Image: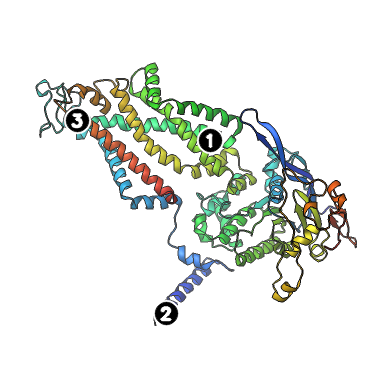
Amino acid sequence: MNDNKLLEVKNLKKYFNLRSGFLSQRFSGSVKAIDGISFFINKGETFGLVGESGCGKSTTARVILRLTNPTEGEVIYNNINIFKISSREMFKVRREIQIIFQDPYASLSPRMTVGDIIGEPYEIHSIGNRQERTKKVKNLLKVVGLNPEHINRYPHEFSGGQRQRIGIARALALTPKIILCDEPVSALDVSVQAQILNLMSSLQKEFDLTYLFIAHDLSVVKHVSDRVGVMYLGKIVEIAKSEDLYEKPLHPYTMGLLSAVPIPDPQLERQRKRIILQGDVPSPLNPPSGCRFHPRCPNAQEICSIEEPQLKNYSEDAGEHLAACFFAGKPI
Amino acid sequence: MHGWIQESGLKKKKLMFEKEKESIGITGEIAEDSYLEKKYSRSSLYKDALKRLRRNKLAMLGLAIVIALILIALFAPLLAPYDPIARIKADSSLAPSSVHLFGTDLLGRDIFSRVIYGSRISIEVGIIAVGISVIIGLFLGALSGYFGNIPDTVIMRIADIFFAFPYILGAIAIMTVLGPGVINIFIAIGILGWASFARIFRSSILTIKNKEYIEAARALGASNYRIITKHIFPNAFAPIIVYATMNIGTAIIVEAALSFLGLGVQPPTAAWGKMLAESLDYIDIAPWMMVFPGLAIVITVLGFVLLGDGLRDAFDPKLR
């Protein structure tokens, strides 16, 4: 086996059960937010996870952090199955896995000063005394490009980009090994997005970080990721190295997504043929039979609605390029 | 000309900023504009609320009434010209005059002094009874909102029972069981009031519980206790302060009603409700016996309600 894997997700499932009725609370179906996904992240790399909203990307991050319990499956971090360990042991693991949230307005408590917010990890894990903590917090503020003198400010005194920097500083506080980034830039202006992304990549080099980068913006993911997984309705439909995925997408859904990325050249943009996916994402409460993408797929044939395609390696060299499609690589 | 002056001013500011940056040893980019803009306006949400409250004239009137009332209650022995329970037979049922500012009652007691002493009971009941309600309500509301499921269902159904019961009737029932007396009034009003606090607190917890900063704390490994006390309480507390302030007024009215009915404070202690009851038979011949304690109740309750209203607007300016 590859020793380089820092985090491995195996056949992870998360169903949200719906109950109806006032007294009896009958079971009335379940939303399959994640339905058996597997992937791994190597030490020091950035793994991008893309997909439309509602496909289970954020749920994946929350399950990995054990913020909600999975229905089935394993998450193996550093050879530890984090669903099998006690909450005391999980407490230690939490130092090494951190998260950055999408909305910088909701992810910082409005009643705490920046110093309290970034210093909280130290307090929870009883690290250092008051002076040492203040010193560390000021240092972190410097690291993320904020003024250390702002330590006594409240979050509402900062802009969105600055708030996201505060969130990053909080995630960095415990010197984690891996940071789950749940759409860290999608709530920001484009110019600020670039700043934050640059900050994140310089931090990655400086602190030897591994990222799980969740986003719905393919151009952003391409910019930062080493490997990319594409999710559709709770399933991973394609995993490949970033370049491979963008050059030779195999799954028709990936092709559709890539085609939605605008090219910053009006002439090329006008000439190219865009693939426009028809219809909406079906309800995860009642997903289509067979391949979940078949109702929207231009290549769909009879088999697609009967049998479910599994992830298979289609790589031409020794690498890995997985896709779950019976007609992988067939142009649309 | 004009533009040039402005520009040079801006340059100066920027220069100052650069110097400051150097002095604290920062390199790299920092969002400068907001630094300049907000350097001198450090503020917390509570401070902002206070600022807004100060601008609200009605609320400041309410605050003045409340503060005056508390001072009157504290310094009653110094302010009252007569002993509130001393009977002066010769002075029975005198109309207001310079000797007896508010007149005297049937037993020759000075009404002015009795109104002043009566404020003690009202303030005590208001603060202690509401305090009891707040403590019970916060505890049960936190359990209910944070843990959900079975505790939530049980606590909220009990709260529904309390809501269904008429307030005064409930107070009368409890007082009948416990017997009259000031301490029993605290208990009766305190117990009856918790349900609204629990509901308000539960609902604010429900909105806060799913915010990302709570998840962030949990991802850091924060305990439930820490999340409730450090993250949820400070963010859910504003509506409790507002409602408690208004509720003090209600508690004072209920105390007055209970005393009026003879279930609350016992004679000869001075209480406004009791004084109203005693004046009942003499309204036509000695209206001052009723007017002054009645006015005292109205002004007090008005003070707390105005302050509560002002606090609500101050905490959430969007509501207005």
The residue located at (52%, 57%) in the rendering is A151
- Tell me which label, 3 or 2, sits earlier in the chain: 2
Q: For mark 3, does the 10 Å Cα neighbourhood hold few (<14), some (14 to 19), or many (20 or more) residues?
A: many
The residue located at (53%, 29%) in the rendering is B155
The residue located at (52%, 55%) in the rendering is A155
Mark on residue B113? Answer: 3
| B32 on left or right of A196 | left
- Tell me which label, 3 or 1, sits earlier in the chain: 3
| B179 on left or right of A315 | left
The residue located at (47%, 67%) in the rendering is B36
Q: In the image, what residue type sits under mark 2?
A: Gly
3D distance between C-alphas at marks 3 and 1: 44 Å
Residue at label 1?
B142
Contact between marks 2 and 1 (CB within 8 A): the answer is no
Residue at label 2?
B3
Mark on residue A221? Answer: none
Report the mark closest to the observer, 3 or 1. 1
Q: Quadrant of residue B246?
A: top left
Quarter of the picture containing the N terminus of chain B is: bottom left
The answer to whether residue A78 is seen in the rendering is yes
Q: In the image, what residue type sits under mark 3?
A: Ser
| B281 versus B253 height, above or below | above
Report the mark closest to the observer, 3 or 2. 2
Q: For mark 2, does the 10 Å Cα neighbourhood hold few (<14), some (14 to 19), or many (20 or more) residues?
A: few
Q: Residue furthest bottom?
A: B1
In the rendered image, residue A17, in percent from the top left (x then y), is placed at: 70, 37
| A178 versus B292 height, above or below | below
In the rendered image, residue A201, in percent from the top left (x then y), is placed at: 69, 63
